[in-house]
Image (cartoon, grey):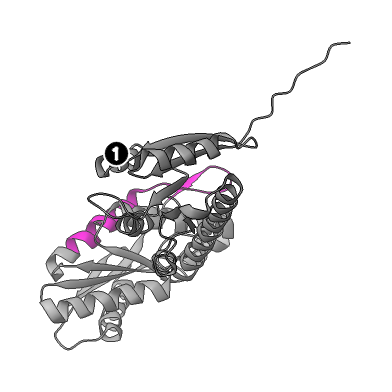
């Protein structure tokens, strides 16, 4: 009979211990080395340069830092680490001041531990609580980011949705009213999209919308904003752009879409075209007026044969 030895991997925890007192660092290190249920990598720092170097080198799972540090206080380090979302921070203090504890927690510390009551059990308990608090905070942040994504982006194309693109337009209108400069808007509509949907099916239609979204993003600047206005209509907000420059962008985009190959469910290729309406901001206009003029220009493009760009100055 052969016995198979299974190696159990212990979780790895990388802890940065910041204290200018070597004796205090040694005590913390001793307690941490006695922890048996996980593998702990201990980094030590006693001065500002050492702390910064450790933080810059990469992954840190937890920071234990004394409030009384030379050159830069533990509280200042706490604020910086919390702002950068580097790792959870547990504040250590020799005084056991309630005022320091309250301030540390208000500044975002995940835990607080007076050195006077330091023990292995208390240290491990505080670290575990801090790690769990950090995990919950990160999960909450991820959930919030997902909610914001769902609230602001179109699930099919990944573009700004109607609400978000109009908000971006409103922001740019406020900017141009305050600081002057140019602002233009393109409204784009896929020609005969319903016929394509009926002929090739809705799944292919969805792929067309996705492809058009990609082509739009590839043919505008990073400072421009592209959004799905509804159905097969899209809006492109062009900051610092006059009408003539916006027409160049629209024409470049029209050609890119006209020459792109779409594929049906059988792999055969087909083409699509788009119509576009362009307008530029006039003093005193609000977002609805600018959108309305772009929509009127788009209607003119459709009336004049589609696969074209029209503008209303």
Outermost residue toward the bottom in this view: 284
Q: Is residue 313 visible?
A: no
Residue 255 part of the magenta segment: yes
Question: Residue 63, percent across and down?
Answer: 43, 47
Quadrant in the picture for the N terminus? top right
Label 1 neighbour load within 10 Å: few <14, some 14-19, many 20+: some
In the depicted view, which residue is nearer to us: 85 or 205?
85
Q: In this image, 304 relative to 138: left or right?
A: left
What residue sits right under mark 1 in the picture?
50
* Label 1: element kind: helix
Vertical side of 56 occupied by 275: above or below = below
Specify the segment rendered in magenta: 247-270
Question: Residue 201, percent across and down?
Answer: 59, 58
Q: Is residue 156 visible?
A: yes
Outermost residue toward the top in this view: 1
Question: Residue 188, percent across and down?
Answer: 34, 68
Q: In this image, 282 relative to 224: left or right?
A: left
- Quarter assignment of residue 165: bottom left
Residue visible at 48% across and 71% down in the picture: 151
- Quarter assignment of residue 95: bottom left
Vertical side of 291 occupied by 146: above or below = above
Q: In this image, 8 relative to 287: left or right?
A: right
């Amino acid at each position: 009979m052969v016995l198979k030895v299974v190696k159990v991997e212990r979780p790895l925890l990388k802890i940065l211990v910041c204290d200018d007192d070597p004796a205090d660092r040694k005590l913390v290190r001793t307690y941490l080395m006695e922890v048996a249920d996980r593998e702990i990598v201990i980094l030590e720092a006693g001065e500002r340069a050492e702390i910064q170097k450790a933080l810059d080198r990469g992954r840190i799972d937890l920071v234990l830092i004394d409030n009384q540090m030379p050159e830069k206080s533990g509280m200042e380090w706490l604020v910086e680490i919390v702002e950068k979302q580097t790792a959870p921070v547990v504040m250590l203090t020799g005084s056991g001041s309630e005022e320091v504890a309250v301030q540390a927690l208000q500044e975002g510390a995940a835990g607080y531990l007076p050195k006077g009551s330091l023990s292995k059990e208390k240290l491990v308990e505080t670290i575990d609580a801090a790690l769990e608090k950090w995990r919950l905070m990160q999960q909450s942040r991820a959930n919030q980011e997902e909610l914001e994504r769902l609230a602001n982006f179109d699930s099919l194309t990944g573009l700004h949705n109607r609400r978000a693109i109009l908000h971006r337009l409103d922001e740019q209108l406020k900017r141009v009213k305050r600081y002057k400069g140019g602002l233009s808007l393109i409204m784009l509509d896929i020609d005969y999209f319903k016929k394509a949907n009926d002929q090739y099916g809705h799944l292919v239609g969805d792929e067309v919308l996705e492809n058009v979204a990609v082509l739009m993003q590839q043919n505008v600047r990073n400072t421009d904003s592209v959004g799905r206005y509804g159905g097969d209509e899209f809006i492109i907000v062009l900051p610092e752009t006059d009408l003539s420059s916006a027409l160049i962008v629209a024409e470049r985009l029209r050609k890119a879409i006209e020459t792109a190959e779409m594929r049906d469910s059988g792999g055969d290729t087909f083409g699509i075209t788009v119509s576009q309406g362009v307008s530029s901001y006039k003093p005193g206009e609000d977002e609805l007026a600018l959108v309305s003029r772009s929509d009127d220009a788009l209607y003119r493009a459709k009336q004049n044969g589609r696969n074209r760009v029209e503008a209303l100055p």
